[in-house]
Image (spheres, grey):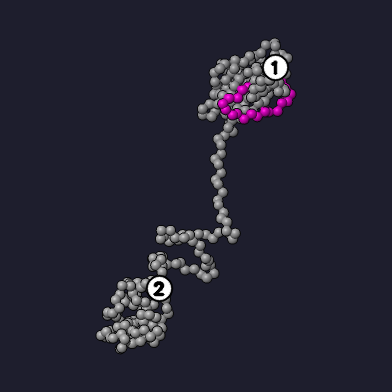
């Protein structure tokens, strides 16, 4: 069905049945389709002289062309003998086809903010911003949590002390388990953590210093080392200490300078009563 420049669909091909505007590409003269059923059909007669015998529009005094149903200038309806409202011609950008608007109730209608059209595409609606003109940006995502590390818990161990006394000679008879000593926590950070006692002559102090009260006299100055493994776990290496290093209440000390992998919860025994428990997290 033809569409007039104002966007109305009309069965007539020369004049719009809605607004009376001339259809695009239609010559000024030619046969006129019959009007609506309520009005008797009018057939065009021979073309008249526009300056002498043409009927004048009662509204704008423009000569009527070839029995046209509407005035070419003001769209006066000659069939109904009534003026038609003037509809301004559309702008070029209004000729683009667009979907019909969705109906809105008067109570809920709001101004539709939109971005400017780019490359002749429809505008994209935006939600209204705050009253002060500032736009609230979403907060940045939280950084990923670092992988869980390992912690060494150092404390006197009564069971280990008794086991050590049972296999020691008379020289250990004067040793006494400390009455109280709070646990110490040391976070393990690579590549290694040293275990021993501070040298008072040089001031050299290991990472886990067991010379602090209550000092463990059975620990060597350079007793053992906790070494980080490529997979993030840890291993213990005895530094050829005087009294050796045992694991999980074993009576046999580990070999010097040979790394022994540790699991979560393993207990490393050094000196006369000290147990170092390694834990993940």
Query: Please, what secondary structure does the residue beneath circle 1 have?
Result: loop
Rendered location of residue 255, percent (x, y): 56, 16
Residue extending furthest left? 46
C-alpha gap between disc 2 and disc 1: 103 Å
Rendered location of residue 101, percent (x, y): 44, 67
Q: Indicate left or right for 190 with 95 as reference.
A: right
Report which quarter residue 220 is drawn in: top right
Q: Which mark is residue 201?
A: 1
Q: Name the residue: 65% across, 24% down.
A: 208
Residue extending furthest bottom? 53
Q: Name the residue: 36% across, 84% down.
A: 62
Q: Name the residue: 62% across, 28% down.
A: 152
Give the residue at mark 2.
Answer: 89
Please name which of the two marks, 2 or 1, marks the residue nearer to the observer. 2
Instruction: Specify whether residue 172 is painted magenta.
Output: no
Camera-side residue of 86 and 102: 86
The region drawn magenta spans 177-195
Query: Please, what secondary structure does the residue beneath circle 2 have?
Result: loop
Disc with the residue nearer the chain's start (2 vs 1): 2
Q: Name the residue: 70% across, 14% down.
A: 172
Tell me, yes or no, if residue 41 can be seen here: no
């Amino acid at each position: 069905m033809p569409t007039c420049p104002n966007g109305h669909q009309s069965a007539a091909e020369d004049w719009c049945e809605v607004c009376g505007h001339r259809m695009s590409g239609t010559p000024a003269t030619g046969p006129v389709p019959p009007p609506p059923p309520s009005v008797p059909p009018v057939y065009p007669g021979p073309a008249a002289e526009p300056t002498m015998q043409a009927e004048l529009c009662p509204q704008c005094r423009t000569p009527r062309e070839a029995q046209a149903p509407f005035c070419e200038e003001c769209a006066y309806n000659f069939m109904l003998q009534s003026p038609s409202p003037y509809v301004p011609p559309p702008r070029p950008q209004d000729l683009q086809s667009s979907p019909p608007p969705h109906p809105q109730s008067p109570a809920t209608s709001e101004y539709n903010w939109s971005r400017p059209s780019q490359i002749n595409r429809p505008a994209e609606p935006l939600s209204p911003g705050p009253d002060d003109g500032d736009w609230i940006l979403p907060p940045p995502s939280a950084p990923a949590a670092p992988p869980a590390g390992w912690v060494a818990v150092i404390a006197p161990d009564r069971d280990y002390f008794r086991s050590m006394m049972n296999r020691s000679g008379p020289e250990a008879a004067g040793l006494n388990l400390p009455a109280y000593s709070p646990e110490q926590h040391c976070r393990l950070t690579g590549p290694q953590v040293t275990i021993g006692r501070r040298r008072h002559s040089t001031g050299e102090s290991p990472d886990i210093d067991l010379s602090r009260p209550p000092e463990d006299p059975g620990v060597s100055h350079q007793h053992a080392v906790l070494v980080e493994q490529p997979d993030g776990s840890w291993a213990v290496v005895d530094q050829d200490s005087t009294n050796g290093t045992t694991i999980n209440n074993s009576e046999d000390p580990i070999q010097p300078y040979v790394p022994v992998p540790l699991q979560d919860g393993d207990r490393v025994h050094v000196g006369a009563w000290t147990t170092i428990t390694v834990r993940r997290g």
